[in-house]
Amino acid sequence: VDFDQEKITKAVWAAAQAVGGRDRRLAQRLSNRVVALLEEKFPREIPGVEDVQDLVEKVLIEEGHARTAKAYILYRKQHESLRKIKTTFLEVEKIVSDYLSQIDWRVRENSNIGYSMSGLMLHVAGSVITDYTLDRIYSMEIADAHRNGDIHLHDLYFGITGYCAGWSLSKLLHEGFNGVPGVIESKPAKHLDTALLQMVNFIGTLQNEWAGAQAFNSIDTYLAPFIR
């Protein structure tokens, strides 16, 4: 994107007007000061949006326009949200297109998930969760390392949940299938077929809440009493 000083002037002027400012020429002078600092700091490159906005805040505060600076910070946050919304719409189209054309390597990241409609739905939702996980859970250094390809964090689609887990079959057989308020419960199984069905339901339910495999311990030992 080409650099445009007028955008800086308009942003400063809008912030000034929000707190009662009436001198647009002052906004222009402040804008000139920002540009001078940008030329000094970035002599051979075009500064990024964040770089420009950081210097605008700096100039406003140093020049004694604290109220305008606060209004500008609010303006900055609002426009950052708008940029993210716009970026999100563009990325969704790219995410779907890259999956359908199988350009995205993540189509084959998990060998248990095939190229399919259900795989596409997981891919789209997982891409959102991946960004959330990198932005909110991992440090900036780790997130940047993953995005730059220096390291690979596997299965970020499930980054906010646990991976694999083992469960007590003894507890299921003694208590039955229960534990969720307001949901139908099953008493302890009395026959092998009932015990197996409860095991299937238990594992199936928990599998939806975890990323990796779910397992019971000592199956042969605990099911032995049901075999007569």
Image (cartoon, rainbow, N blue to C red):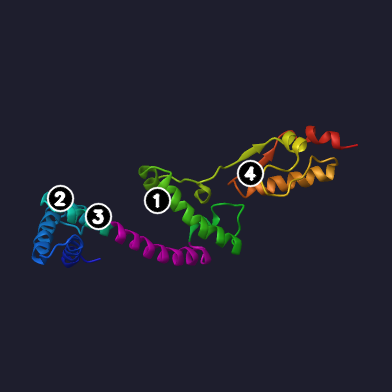
**Where residue 27 sits: x, y (%)?**
12, 62
Query: At 57% across and 52% down in the image, what residue appears?
Result: 110
The answer to whether residue 83 is magenta is: yes
**Where residue 226 sits: x, y (%)?**
85, 37
Left or right of 181? Residue 46 is left
Which of labels 4 and 2 is toward the front? Answer: 2
Q: Quadrant of the C terminus?
A: top right
Q: Which residues are magenta?
A: 77-103
Residue 73 is labelled as 3
Q: Amino acid at mark 2?
A: Ile
Query: At 85% across and 33% down in the image, what residue appears?
Result: 225
Label 3's element? Answer: helix
Residue 130 is at least partly visible in this image: yes
Q: Amino acid at mark 4?
A: Ala
Mark 4–mark 1 Cα distance, whole angstroms, equals 27 Å
Between 206 and 22, the residue placed more toward the observer is: 22
Q: Which residue is mark 4?
A: 213
Q: Which residue is mark 1?
A: 147
Q: Amino acid at mark 1?
A: Arg
- Do labels 4 and 1 touch, CB within 8 Å? no
Bin the neighbour count of mark 4 within 10 Å (Cα to Cα): few under 14, some 14-19, many 20 and up. few
Left or right of 198? Residue 23 is left
Bin the neighbour count of mark 3 within 10 Å (Cα to Cα): few under 14, some 14-19, many 20 and up. some
- Do labels 4 and 2 touch, CB within 8 Å? no
Left or right of 179? Residue 85 is left
Residue 80 is labelled as none
Left or right of 121? Residue 57 is left
Mark with earlier residue (4, 1): 1
Q: Amino acid at mark 3?
A: Ile
Mark with earlier residue (1, 2): 2
Q: Quadrant of residue 199?
A: top right
Bin the neighbour count of mark 2 within 10 Å (Cα to Cα): few under 14, some 14-19, many 20 and up. some
